[in-house]
Amino acid sequence: MNESTKSILIGCYEIPGFGGASTATYKLFEMMQADGVEVRLFNLINPKDVPFFRYAYGEDYGNPRRLAQVANCLLDHPPGAGDAALAKMIRDAGPDLMLGVGYIAARLMKNAAPEIPLAFLTTGSFQAEQLIARGTAKDAASLLRFLQRAVNVRQRFQERQMTEIIEKADLILTHSPLTKSLFECFFPYHTEKFYTQIVWFAEWIYEDARQYAHL
């Protein structure tokens, strides 16, 4: 590895095939690896889920295509702010940069290795989901219009764990223009961290997700 090359560690909660974020993350990792990027992938797993994952996906759960540099990390239970198992795995991997996909993974990774720069890639907005569920708006687009006027509502719905990773992340990547606008509404004092370009993954997750439609 030359001096300009950076090694990257990607982390996502759960495993490919079980959720959209983890399936998309696995595909992203595979594409980066094919492009020659020095990259590793950690699936962050609650140990209580292992029996089901093993039953539903077999012994290759977490790495269905048996790619190199993929590891399952069984978290302390319940997952804590400074997970010891994850911290050791990160130290052993020695990445230059980390990418946490989804706020659970991003928060766990940054707390386990606060000295390593971390980019947080969004997979949704917990606050938006809660407000829509409560009937504040019928969908995300109408919620955004509402939030742009209702500053007091935004402040009440700054969920603690999401706020923590927004504050600690070194860079924030969003996966759709609407998500970016929602996050900027909820976290107006951190907009300088938001990368200007959108990181789309809908178009390349579809085929991978189809194979798990029967589960």
Image: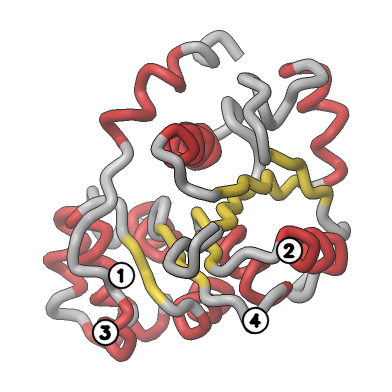
Do residues under tags 3 and 4 come within 8 Å of each other at their CB atoms? no
In this rendering, which labeled residue sits more in front, label 1 or label 4? Answer: 4
The answer to which of marks 1 and 3 sits earlier in the sequence is: 1
- Asked if one can make out residue 136 in the rendered structure from this viewpoint, the answer is yes
SS type, badge 2: helix
The answer to which of marks 1 and 4 sits earlier in the sequence is: 4
Do residues under tags 1 and 2 come within 8 Å of each other at their CB atoms? no
Q: CA distance from mark 3 to mark 4?
A: 20 Å
Q: Which mark is residue 129?
A: none
Give the amino acid at mark 3: Glu
Q: Is residue 54 above or below residue 131?
A: above
Q: CA distance from mark 4 to mark 2?
A: 11 Å
Count up the numbered dots: 4
SS type, badge 4: loop
The answer to which of marks 3 and 4 sits earlier in the sequence is: 4
Q: Is residue 36 above or below residue 23?
A: below
Residue beneath disc 2: 90
State the image coordinates of residue 199 (x, y, percent, origin top left). 28, 51
In this rendering, which labeled residue sits more in front, label 3 or label 2? Answer: 2
Residue beneath disc 3: 192
Do residues under tags 1 and 4 come within 8 Å of each other at their CB atoms? no
- Residue 202 placement, left or right of 38: left
SS type, badge 1: helix
Give the amino acid at mark 4: Pro
Q: Which mark is residue 114?
A: 4
Give the amino acid at mark 2: Ile
Q: CA distance from mark 3 to mark 2?
A: 27 Å
Do residues under tags 1 and 3 come within 8 Å of each other at their CB atoms? no
Give the amino acid at mark 1: Phe
Q: Residues within 10 Å of mark 2 (few under 14, many from 20)?
A: some
Residue beneath disc 1: 183
